[in-house]
Amino acid sequence: MTRNPTYSALTLRVKPSGESNREAWFLTAEEGLLRATVFGGPKSRFRSLVSPFHQGKLILYHNPVRDSRKVDDFDVHSYRMGIRELWERSVCADALAETVLSSQGGGGSWPEALELAGGVLDALDGADAAACPRLAVYFLWRWAGLLGFAPELPASSTCELKHDEVLWGSSFRVGPGAIAWLKEIESLSPAALGKVPPEHWSVDAASLNQAKTLSQAVMAGALGRRLPTWDGI
């Protein structure tokens, strides 16, 4: 096994480690979630390259004796600088990252997980404030489906979805407006949502709130807990 494997990777989280180093968590298409040390102080070029939501080709050095990894190189192709320029974008992106980390990177569906997470982050990078909550619901609902936890929606949007209190742990109703919108976004990618006419984003506030409540409840059931980062979306 090579000691310098290459990955298609998305940076999810970066935290200080010691006086000058940092620990970074990545979602990769090849091995799912990986943690690696980023060596170097403020003058290291990796300080700017290995940042949350940056995505590209990652090269790690793997020490098989210690089973430790360090970043050897990171060729970033998506910086997504716009995410930190708007509070709503940042909140949704943070919720996405914590959801991915809390669900082991999507189980074993790593290429699909990376494609979904990267696609939503691309859409968030230029989204306006009103679109951000919708993208957050889109991600949670599609992520629940990736994990195999999304409930089957009724064939007719005129029916209300009955809630499963044992699985989701709370009481609520999901009306036809929310069901119709969730069924619509199941067939669209984040990139497509950014190109279609505005009516594809149109959903009344009550239906959007119901869709958000359902998607969060389903994901909470999958994870066994509710993430605090969902509060802001």
Image: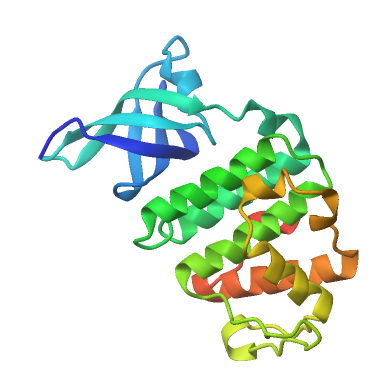
The one nearer the camera, 146 or 186, is: 186
Q: Residue at x 41, y 41 (%)?
A: 26
- Please state the horizontal and vertical placement of residue 61, each as a whole percent of the image: 22, 30
- Residue farthest to the top? 43
Instruction: Residue 227 in the image: state x and y as whole percent.
Output: 61, 61
Side (left or right) of 11 relative to 142: left
Q: Quadrant of the N terminus?
A: top left
On the rendered structure, is 30 left or right of 177? left
- Please give left or right for residue 74 compared with residue 99 in the image: left
User: In percent of the image, x 79 and y 84: which residue is there?
Assistant: 173
- Colour mode of the rendering: rainbow
Judging depth in this view, the residue of 197 and 17 nearest the camera is: 197
The answer to whether 206 is drawn above or below residue 18 in the figure is below
Estimate the x, y position of residue 70 in percent, counting from the top left.
28, 30
Q: Quadrant of residue 136?
A: bottom right
Count of labels in the image: 0
Residue 101 image position (x, y, % from top left): 47, 53
Seen at 75% across and 48% down, the residue is 196
Image position of 19 with respect to 204: above or below:
above
Frontmost residue, 51 versus 16: 51
Is residue 228 visible from the viewing direction of this image? no
Q: Quadrant of the C terminus?
A: bottom right
Q: Residue at x 47, y 13 (%)?
A: 42
State whether residue 70 appears in this view: yes
